[in-house]
């Protein structure tokens, strides 16, 4: 693990989880730096991070004045990290569903790839404590993505992944409007379009034990609509 690795953790209402996840990140990946991007959580998540920063220089905090969503939080974190000369950028959830202990396996794939995805749907990957309805939604969403966009990635909607700096420098971050799980698909789509190599690493995804899921009908509708639009553009070879 290099000190040039930045783990970006977007948060909204994660006061019950943030201390635990930061402690686990630091224990499993002591050389990494962590950037929390908080959407002005009313439950005090940002204030907790501020307290932790006083005794740990590897933790940083960016606070959005309004709730901007997952995509905007990651783009803001990417831009901050690019300005600070980090080489590897990691996406990780704050709720404990992405085990920090599995990060070294994801990063190892960057020896051969430009983007390394933590995948629930490749051999060796699995989900714990998810209802069947959520599993069907995830599998169905990824199948829909593969059919519409024509790539072979098994888990394009997953949010545990790592990028080399060159990928984020090449992708036009300012043009990204997608949010939620659609943002994750968008990043894979753009990476592949620029010729970057995308690999998948099996992970164990565990449902959160505290706090509330950010999944909503609006997120599902956005993903279905945008992916369908991208698929039609691909079909008719539109720019």
Image (cartoon, rainbow, N blue to C red):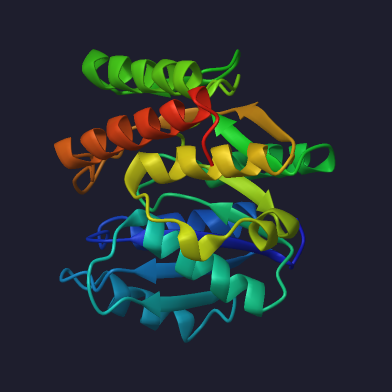
Residue 159 visible here: no
Which residue is painted at 77% across and 43% down in the image? 110
Residue 202 visible here: yes
**Among the 4 quarters of the image, the one containing residue 83:** bottom right
147 relative position to 16: left or right: right
Q: Report the residue that reaches farthest toward the bottom.
A: 54
For the residue pair 156 and 10, the one nearer the viewer reads as 156
Where residue 34 appears, as percent x and y from the top left, is: 55, 67
For the residue pair 150 and 216, the one nearer the viewer reads as 150
166 relative position to 203: left or right: right
Where residue 201 appears, as percent x and y from the top left, is: 65, 29
- Residue 102, placed above or below residue 93: above
Which residue is painted at 29% across and 33% down in the image? 225
149 relative position to 192: left or right: left
For the residue pair 52 and 73, the one nearer the viewer reads as 73
Where residue 47 appears, as percent x and y from the top left, is: 29, 79
Q: Report the residue that reaches farthest toward the right.
A: 111
């Amino acid at each position: 693990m290099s000190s040039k690795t930045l783990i970006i953790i977007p948060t909204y209402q994660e006061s019950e989880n943030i201390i635990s996840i930061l402690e686990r990140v630091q224990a499993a990946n002591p050389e990494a730096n962590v950037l929390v991007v908080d959407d002005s959580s009313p439950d005090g998540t940002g204030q907790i991070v501020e307290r932790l920063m006083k005794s740990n220089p590897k933790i940083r905090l960016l606070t959005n004045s309004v709730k901007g969503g997952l995509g905007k939080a990651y783009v803001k974190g990417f831009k901050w990290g690019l300005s600070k000369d980090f080489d590897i950028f990691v996406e990780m959830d704050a709720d404990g569903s992405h085990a920090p202990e599995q990060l070294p396996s994801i990063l190892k794939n960057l020896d051969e790839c430009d983007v390394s995805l933590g995948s629930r749907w490749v051999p060796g990957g699995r989900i714990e404590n998810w209802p069947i309805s959520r599993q069907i939604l995830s599998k169905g969403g990824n199948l829909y993505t593969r059919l519409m966009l024509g790539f072979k990635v098994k888990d394009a909607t997953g949010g545990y992944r790592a990028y080399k700096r060159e990928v984020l420098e090449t992708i036009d971050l300012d043009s990204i409007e997608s949010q939620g799980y659609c943002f994750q698909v968008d990043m894979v789509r753009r990476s592949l379009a620029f010729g970057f190599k995308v690999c998948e690493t099996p992970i164990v995804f565990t449902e959160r034990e505290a706090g509330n899921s950010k999944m909503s009908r609006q997120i599902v509708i956005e993903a279905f609509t945008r992916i369908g639009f991208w698929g039609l553009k691909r079909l008719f070879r539109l720019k």
